[in-house]
Image (tube, coloured by chain):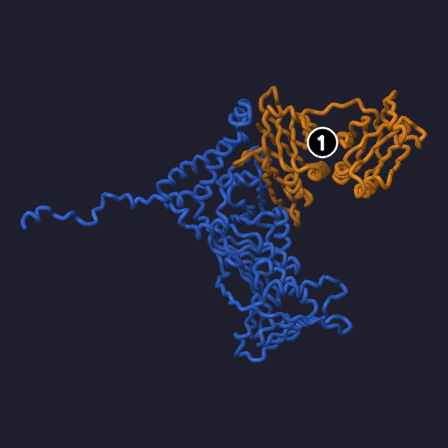
Amino acid sequence: MKFRAVMVDTAAMRDFMNTVNSLSKLAKECVIRIVERRVYFIISNEDAGPRKPFVWCELPVNFYFKQYNLTGVNEEHNEIYLAFATGMLARSLSALKQNARSLKIKLTNKQMPCLTLEIELASSEGIEARQLIHDVPVEVISRQHWEDYAEPRFNDFHVSIQMPNLKPIKNIVERMKTMSNALIMSANKYGRLTLKIKTNMVTLSAHFPELSVESFAVGHMPDDEEMEYESEESDLQTVSATIDIKKFLMFLTGMQVNNCKTTCSIVQSKMVKLALEQPGALSFQCFLTELSS
Amino acid sequence: MNCVIPGVNVKVLSKTIQALSKIGDELQLEPRKDYLIFKAANMTTTAYCIFKFLDTFFSSYEIEDPEKVDDLSCVIPMKAILGVFKSHGHKDKKPEICKIELNDDNKIIFKFKYKHDVVVVRSLFLNDGQIVNINYNTLTSNQVSANAHLFSQVLTNFQAGDDDIGIEVYANKALMRNYIAGDINKSKGIRSQLTLTTGEFNSFQIGQETNITFSLKPFRAAIHFAESSNLGVCLNFETSGKPVILVIRNPTFEVNVVIATLNTDHISQSSLSTSIMLKTKSKAKHNMTIQDQQALESVNWDNDFDLQGENGFDNRKSQTDKNKSNTNLTINNNIPSINNALIDERPNLGNDENKDTDMVPGSPESPRSKRIKTIFGRCYETTFHSTMMDLGNVLAPDSDPELDDNF
């Protein structure tokens, strides 16, 4: 098994650092899957029985790396799966903030398997370079467990709607969190996204109208129970799902990646998928399943 | 003793107290004829810090009876004095002057004068305690100095949980790395290493290439203090086992911080733990498929790992075997072999992209485990002594039976 990759572009290094930083806010442990053209970061859902991903993040190799060498387990399975602590990698990469010239990532065996990060820093005088090496211990995931980290394929969403700017949403959801732990996310075919909490005392909802709808499955009709709740809205064609507000807030706080297109897809009473995309550089998917109450 | 400190220097004094509080639980105050000494040492006296404020630091400095100046030395509990200087964070409450009074009545009085003639008086009782004096020599073979900002930047690359820092110096560069004490196989920490070239330092005089390891906490405290006053820091050290002395100088005061370094004569211990490491690693493989294991074993993790790394491990293994028979001999062999390996791999770092080395020298013991060994010394001694088994030596000859016959 061999892996070595070199990054020299400042923007790429910054994006990479931001992505890892976001991951560190979402979970303690993460799996990196390295294949020929892509690098994946996968966070599993701890509570789900059969492992379902909570976060699926995909980075194209050609955007980030100038050099990229990979030798997997064998030719047939030219992949490497490693588990690591997100906090450690994020802290090690934080040195990239100080004027880094290049970042080299390698898989090494230094008494234990490590991801070695070699960072070349320009010194304050700017003439001579400092060499910084961090060894982040990793765990190699054996092939029999690879299937736990298979790519999620869902395409039967009832609605996909583009999200507005995440920052105001974060402010609203933060306040909602103090009152309830379940958030009802709903969207209709006219591009209205609604975030709602319900308690015995109060029902609070935030509406974001006139968003662009990417797809809407016709023929879905809410059942009777929901019709009561939604009756105040003229439109009955609303898809909604109840999710854990904490996890949604984690996603909103974690995602400090700029100029991304965010899409929200909902399966009626099943799940919400939040997809962040920076074309050519990053694809980030977060799966929030229906809260069982 | 009476002294008055101008407002600008009160901040320096409060940073001084903060730095000293990181080192010891007691502050020792020693007035002298024309300077005042603040110092602290930790319990095990592996770190010692001394601040010497010249009379120019004060707007007035008076000693009533220069003959009896030794009687004025006193010990103040650190927590108490930390409280005295803590409340200066408020911007509108910056003191104009601070007056320190120390008399024979077992009390020290701090008077802070603020705007509008507000005066805050704080008096502290003194502790009974002994003044620790440590002799050291700042004229050492290795002297490295740089602005505190450089060291502070270096320290940002280490984690908050790191206890020890290792500095390795060569004629043209310095390597700084963190040390993970104790069981390497258990710890899951990040190992970091930073290479600095001589150009980054203000002066870089290496008389003897060496590798020292010392505690980060007092080092951080000293660097933090120096950075707050934007001063230079000079590191004076000789070799492992000898203390490293940090010198921070200003026209009105001087700071010396003495930190004990690890004695790497005990490095055989760490090479032992490496061999344990290798065993546990093979254990960890059991949940992998055979194919995985083959892939792990057949392909080298990196190109020239087999060239140097495995040789290094083999060396160590054979030396740990030797350990069993002759401990003293291995200690002597071990150090040069590791040092050689290090020298071999360093030139690769910068230029050759494909040549990466993975030989990690074992961390020398931490002061903590060393302390355990001094207390539970017998537990670490070998239970077998050749002298115990030496049956060939005749201590007293057998009594001669023939003599009996003659009776």
Q: Is residue A102 visible?
A: no
Q: Quadrant of residue A71?
A: top right
According to the picture, the residue beneath numbered tag 1 turns out to be A54
**Which of these two is toward me, B183 or B98?**
B183
Residue B272: x, y in percent? 44, 40
Q: Chain of mark 1?
A: A
Q: Is residue B235 visible?
A: yes
Q: Is residue B307 left or right of residue B328?
A: right
Label 1 residue SS:
strand
Residue A176: x, y in percent? 82, 41
Name the residue furthest front.
A200
Question: Which color is chain A depicted in?
Answer: orange
Question: Which color is chain B depicted in?
Answer: blue
Q: Is residue A77 above or below residue A18?
A: above
Residue A144: x, y in percent? 60, 23
Residue B307: x, y in percent? 48, 32
The crowd level at tag 1 (other Cα within 10 Å; few <14, some 14-19, many 20+) is: many
Q: Is residue B270 left or right of residue B160?
A: left
Q: Is residue A166 above or below residue B137?
A: above
Amino acid under disc 1? Phe
**Which of these two is toward me, B223 or B373?**
B373
Q: Is residue A37 above or below residue B384?
A: above
Q: Is residue A250 left or right of residue B312?
A: right
The residue drawn where x is 72% and y is 25% is A152
